[in-house]
Image (cartoon, rainbow, N blue to C red):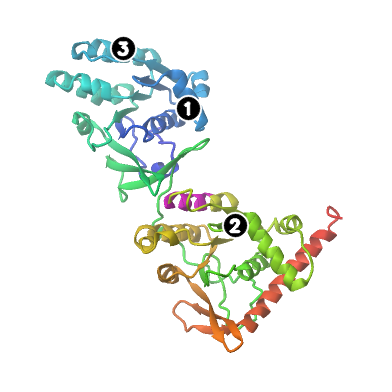
């Protein structure tokens, strides 16, 4: 195998070809930024591919490192037990004269003994500091690490510390001999932790992205997602038309796989009717609908749908029965916007879509409302990229959120079909009007009584599904 893997899907995509045989990778960053996790991931992933790894530590205790990585899904115990991992703990020294005997000599002996193709040095910083004042020693050390990847015909990963207030690796000589340099950072944004990787240098890999967000999750390790290229995004499947409860309505545009529908409604309303229509469409098309809510819990959403059915059908439908009857067609997940930074909400939605594989998604609520106008400039691109991913997967997406001027400008620009729900004053009180348009065409104003007919058809589909489920032999 001529190339090694990062073991992180996003990095392997954008840095394909960077980790070739004979290359030197520097993973630098602030304390606690995830450097050791990435270095361990590289070691582990390539060991699973049959490449023996030598992990040289100047800071981490073996048992502590193995235990922490096991929590993240990186089982160093396993590859050590298979003879694919050697661990070497080197003592710290501040004596530049003993560097060559203690460090270089010991590393050479272990390399000859274990014959690894992957070497991780965690961290190179104590060695660099020990020779900071010695020009000759620094040159010899630089040449040693430059030649080491060629000696093992593999990959060498050097972990380096960057002080919190600094941006450079000190001393910086090692930067010049590295083939690839990744800088890992973290900072607090809105009281939440934001992590990013800066790709400072990558020989052999065409780069279009300089910084990418990442997260570290228990059992999953490092997760990186990158925005799709427009060339990868297919157009909506115009030749296929979704079956719909409103298909006979002249004012309701036809819906095609991969399209985006944006529906806004007054903030005081709960969009139960839209959820019922979407669920009926999922049933009619024999597909799966995934609802991701940023405002309400799954149980609350089920409760509101049950309440709407109760008011319309004058029958009680217990929530558990509703979940059971519609569970094959609807899945609901909820994420609080105050518990995650926006990038994480983006990745959670993408991960859910990849896991559930629905043919229709509803994003309920707008987690960006609390950010005001900053939502457009800072997070608008994330939403756009998320919708491109869904289109790439052939998923029809419904953005269902309370009306907000800035969000309306963004979403109506992205969407193929726009529906705006408005209340207007009348002499009898208040009436609802629905403004519906396909992008590039005239807007149609639809009265509440006309729209209600579609809702009745949708409720009939749900009612029949529930009745059929009750009549099933498994559900007497």
| Callout 1 secondary element | helix
Please, is residue 162 above or below residue 432 in the view?
Answer: above
Mark with earlier residue (3, 1): 1
In the shown orientation, is residue 7 left or right of residue 472?
A: left
Q: How crowded is mark 1: few (under 14 residues within 10 Å), some or many (20 or more)?
A: some
Q: Which residue is drawn at 49% across and 77% down?
A: 438
Q: What secondary structure is the magenta-colored segment mainly?
A: helix
- CA distance separating discs 2 and 3: 55 Å
Whether the magenta-drawn stretch holds residue 318 is answered as: no
Q: Residue 106 carries which label?
A: 3
Q: Is residue 286 visible?
A: no
Q: Report the residue that reaches farthest toward the bottom.
A: 427
Q: Where is residue 197 in the image (x, y as percent from the top left)?
A: 34, 42
| Callout 2 secondary element | loop
Along the line of sight, the residue nearer the viewer: 159 or 319: 319
| Callout 3 secondary element | helix
Please, is residue 218 above or below residue 154 in the view?
Answer: below
Q: Residues within 10 Å of mark 2 (few under 14, many from 20)?
A: many
Mark with earlier residue (1, 2): 1
Please, is residue 295 above or below residue 145 in the view?
Answer: below
Q: Position of residue 42 (x, y in %)?
A: 41, 31
Along the line of sight, the residue nearer the viewer: 187 or 476: 187
In this picture, which residue range is highlighted in magenta?
342-351
Residue tagged by mark 1? 68
Q: Residues within 10 Å of mark 3 (few under 14, many from 20)?
A: some
In the shown orientation, is residue 448 left or right of residue 124?
A: right
């Amino acid at each position: 195998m001529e190339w090694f893997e990062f073991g992180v899907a996003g990095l392997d995509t954008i840095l394909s070809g960077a980790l070739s045989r004979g290359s030197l990778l520097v993973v630098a960053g602030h304390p606690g930024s995830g450097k050791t996790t990435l270095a361990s991931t590289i070691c582990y992933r390539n060991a699973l591919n049959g490449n023996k790894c030598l992990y040289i530590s100047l800071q981490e205790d073996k048992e502590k490192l193995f235990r922490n990585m096991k929590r993240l899904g990186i089982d160093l115990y396993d590859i050590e037990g298979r003879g694919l991992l050697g661990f070497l703990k080197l003592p710290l020294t501040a004596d530049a004269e003993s560097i060559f005997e203690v460090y270089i000599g010991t590393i050479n002996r272990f390399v000859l003994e274990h014959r690894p193709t992957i070497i991780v040095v965690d961290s190179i910083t104590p060695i660099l500091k020990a020779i900071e004042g010695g020009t000759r020693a620094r040159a010899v050390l630089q040449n040693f690490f430059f030649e080491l990847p060629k000696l093992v015909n593999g990959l060498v990963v050097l972990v380096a510390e960057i002080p919190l207030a600094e941006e450079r690796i000190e001393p910086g000589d090692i930067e010049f001999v590295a083939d690839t340099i990744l800088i890992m950072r973290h900072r607090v944004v809105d009281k939440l932790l934001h992590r990013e990787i800066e790709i400072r240098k990558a020989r052999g890999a065409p780069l279009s992205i300089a910084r990418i967000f990442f997260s570290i999750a228990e059992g999953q390790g490092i997760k990186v997602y990158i925005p799709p290229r427009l060339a990868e995004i297919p157009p909506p499947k115009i030749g296929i038309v979704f079956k719909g409860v409103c298909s006979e309505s002249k004012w309701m545009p036809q819906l095609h796989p991969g399209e985006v529908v944006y529906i806004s409604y007054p903030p005081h309303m709960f969009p139960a009717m839209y959820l019922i229509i979407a669920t009926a469409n999922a049933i009619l098309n024999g597909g799966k609908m995934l609802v991701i809510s940023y405002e309400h819990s799954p149980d609350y959403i089920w409760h509101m749908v049950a309440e709407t059915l109760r008011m319309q059908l004058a029958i009680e439908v217990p929530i558990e029965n509703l979940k059971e009857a519609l569970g094959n067609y609807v899945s609901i997940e909820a994420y609080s916007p105050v518990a995650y930074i926006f990038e994480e909400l983006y990745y959670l939605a993408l991960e859910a879509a990849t896991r559930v594989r629905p043919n229709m998604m509803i994003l309920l609520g707008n987690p960006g409302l609390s950010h005001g106008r900053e939502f457009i400039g800072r997070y608008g691109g994330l939403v756009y990229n998320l919708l491109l991913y869904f289109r790439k997967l052939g998923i029809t997406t419904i953005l269902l959120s309370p009306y907000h001027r800035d969000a309306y400008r963004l979403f109506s620009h992205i969407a193929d079909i726009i529906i705006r729900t408005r209340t207007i004053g009348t002499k009898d009180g208040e009436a609802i009007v629905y403004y519906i348009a396909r992008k590039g065409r005239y807007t149609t104003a639809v009265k509440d009584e006309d729209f209600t007919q579609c809702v009745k058809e949708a409720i009939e589909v749900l009612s029949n599904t529930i009745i059929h489920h009750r009549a099933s032999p498994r559900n007497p």
